[in-house]
Image: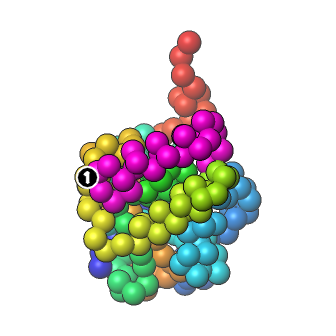
Amino acid sequence: MKIWTIQPWNVWDQLQEFGELRTDLARMRIPNFVPDCYEWLRSQLGYATYPWWAYAERPDLRCYRYTSEPGIQVRMKLELAEADMCVFPLWAWDQVYCGHYLARQPGELEEWETAAEAAEPAWLDLRPDLPEPFGSQLVTSWQHLFSPHLPRQAPFNQGFFCASESRVVVFEVLRMEQVQAVTFFDGTVTPQRRRRKT
């Protein structure tokens, strides 16, 4: 399967030097910071390190150049065996990332939220440390992320990406032999541009 990942120049440079790479916490944008959902995903996949992220559809660099860090960035087109990766809809990962209940059908989300709110009015502030059985139900719902029957587009309003049909891909090892094509582009986001005008 063909997928695309966007990485800073130094990842491409190291990949050429070493032939394969695993993620390195010390080199992340915020060194050694990993949201809990990434640790959950890593453990579910059985990976020794945190996964690489990619897109199942080719990302348009006219958009990504304005959300990437300054300097040379690289879009790599990769060819991976399906057994070496996990693919899921962006809207579903958004639910897990934000600590929301991942429902598969209309009504399921509202039913769970109503029950959680009745038991604990401040439940929104407690996720995922909700009282039982709601804490376990919340985390268990995230298992739906791996269901092959999840639709590419959210079947109901479930977060910011609900209208998107985009799919994201995770895999454990980035190998030089997987690279089919490389496109370089300049990232343009600076700290000053990120600030909102008051």
Q: Quadrant of residue 11?
A: bottom right
Residue lying at 61% horizontally and 48% vertically, measured from the top left: 127
> Going by the image, does 134 lie left or right of 30?
left
Q: Is the residue 190 above or below the residue 100 in the image?
A: above
Q: Residue 184: image x %, image y %?
A: 41, 58
Task: Looking at the picture, tell me which residue is in the foreground, 115 or 91.
Answer: 115
Quadrant for the C terminus, please. Answer: top right
Q: Position of residue 122 (x, y in %)?
A: 63, 36
Any part of residue 21 in sight: no
Three-letter residue code for mark 1: Pro
Which residue corresponds to mark 1? Answer: 155
Q: In this rendering, is residue 96 above or below 81?
A: above
Secondary element type, mark 1 = loop
**Is 41 colored magenta in this rendering?**
no
Residue 194 seen in this snapshot: yes
Q: At x 36% / y 86%, what residue is drawn?
A: 81
Q: Examine the residues drawn in magenta and state their main secondary structure.
A: helix
Placement of 112 over or under 124, stated as above or below: below
Which residues fall within the magenta stretch?
A: 103-127
Is residue 114 rendered magenta in the image?
yes
